[in-house]
Image (cartoon, rainbow, N blue to C red):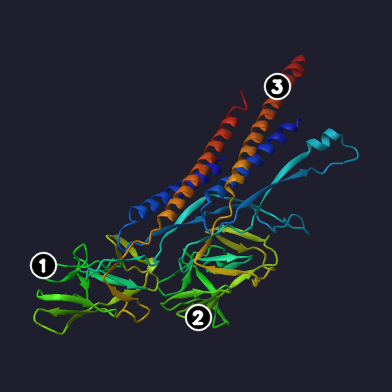
Amino acid sequence: MNNGLYQAYFGVRARQIALEVMAHNLANAASNGYKADQSFFRALRAEIDKERASAKELVSRQSIEVSTGIDFTPGIIRQTGRELDLALEGEGFLAVQTPAGRRYTRNGSLTLNAAGQLVTQEGYLVLGLINGTTPGPITLPPGQIEINEQGVISVDGVEQARLRLVTFSTLATLLKEGGNLFAQTDPQIQEQPAHRLRVQQGALESSNVNSIGEMITMIRMAREFETLQRAITILTSDLGRIISQEVGKL
Amino acid sequence: MNRALFSAATGLQVQQLNIDNISNNIANSVTIGFKRSRLEFQDLLYQNQRTPGAASTNSTQYPVGLQIGLGARAVSTERIFVQGDFRQTENPLDLVIEGKGFFQVRLADGSLAYTRAGSLHLDANGTVVTASGDPIEPAITIPPDAISITIGTDGTVSVTQAGQTTAAQVGQITLATFANPSGLESLGRNLFRETAASGQAITGVPGTNGLGLIQQGFVENSNVNIVEELINMIIAQRAYETNSKVVSTADNMLAIINNTLR
């Protein structure tokens, strides 16, 4: 059977997924702390006997696997002047307690809840070290809040708590959960203090989506998609011609 | 393919909301005591078709997974309580709060509301009221024969009456603050209402409990920065445009599929 048709289909499918990933990125061009998804294509080859197979067979048994990864390059930091806006400079995350467990975020647009606890916009508790030792949620009294580069929070000049700033030996096992949250999927990888992370108060990290780059890739994907569609049309008519000519003779 | 269309649709929706919010800020750029708000966006759920770290064979793992996101959503409108500029008016009943705090206002239905707009007035009975006519809490009445009104930084209201040489104290303005001012509900007319998210009002004399001091003869301008809003508007418009391009590209690709078999 003509495998070229399947190959063209796999190519079309891969580009569909790439477009979906891009559409999601562009929809999040204004989400603070958002990290873009990237799609990768990889050739897969069916297990065949390389010695005996013809060159045509080698090529025609290939297919495409699509994967996505997270691009952790920093977004642009922009000044907002709001005291509970935090931008993280360097590799690392804020640790957040959600009903589903510990999560991590780069979105530093924080607020206080009715009990004076430091929370995310969705109301999840931001974790810290109280008095430098006890881990837990951060409760702040009313007053002027100041947060230094190391993440130490003071209210009216009195030190209250320290933000739990963490990173991992590898970021490859982090999974996005929506809501600008990342989850650690590998229980073997423990969070470790992010020493090289600097906190900037009164600023936010914008989404790192590169709109121009995404648009250019989108145009390329659309054109390649069109080419593959042409290939499918040609292969189908080719198949039709062979069937009518060869099978018709019988 | 439908996922791309729907993701782009969520992108269009959030940018539309963004423009709505920016227009409200700009429309209120000269409203006394107005606090600008900001929309906060987040990514929506993901479809995990293959998790990174999942086993590809008995001994190896997939280094990367396949996660397809489904767009963006607006999660909150955060009100930014940054101090606005002060403008001198020399009107004795124009008050500003230097720092945190809200004036308390008794609404017609008996409930309390809170405001930063301190341009106060007197009604026919000499009661101190807001520009909308709602009395401030605790109620203060200025005698009709008062020649001058002095309001101290701690909120003490004193008047000098005709024929008197010394000032007499007629009231005390108290302020309210909240654990989470961003959780207050906007009522319009520059008024805010307490909610479960804001926490209970903490009232006190100006200058105590982290409350700001009062300055007489000034009004607080809106804290909207027009240049910043215009830049945000341009960014929102471009983001809207980009998302609409995704819609047309996805639509084109669907049309191509439909043309495959002729």
- Label 1 and label 2 in one chain: no
- Left/right of residue B206 with respect to residue A7 in the rendered view: left
Q: Which one is in front in this view, the residue at disc 2 or the one at disc 3? A: 2
Q: At label 3, which amino acid type do we have?
A: Gly
Q: Can you say whether A223 is above or below B142 in the image? A: above
Q: Residues within 10 Å of mark 3 (few under 14, many from 20)?
A: few
Q: Can you say whether A137 is above or below A27 in the image? A: below
Give the residue drawn at x 28%, y 71%: B103
Residue A55: image x %, image y %?
85, 35
Give the residue drawn at x 35%, y 76%: B212
Residue hosting label 1: B124
Q: At label 2, which amino acid type do we have?
A: Gln
Q: Mark 2 and 3 residues: CB-CB less than 8 Å, in contact? A: no
Residue A184: image x %, image y %?
63, 64
Secondary structure at badge 2 equals strand
Q: Which one is in front in this view, the residue at disc 1 or the one at disc 2? A: 1
Q: Nearer the viewer, residue A53 or A26?
A: A26
Cα–Cα span, label 2 and label 3: 77 Å
Quarter occupied by residue A236: top right
Quarter occupied by residue A112: bottom left
Quarter occupied by residue A65: top right
Residue B201 seen in render = no
Cα–Cα span, label 1 and label 3: 93 Å
Residue hosting label 3: A240
Q: At label 1, which amino acid type do we have?
A: Ala
Residue hosting label 2: A160
Report the residue that reaches farthest toward the top.
Answer: A249
Residue A165: image x %, image y %?
59, 71
Q: Nearer the viewer, residue B180 or A191?
A: B180
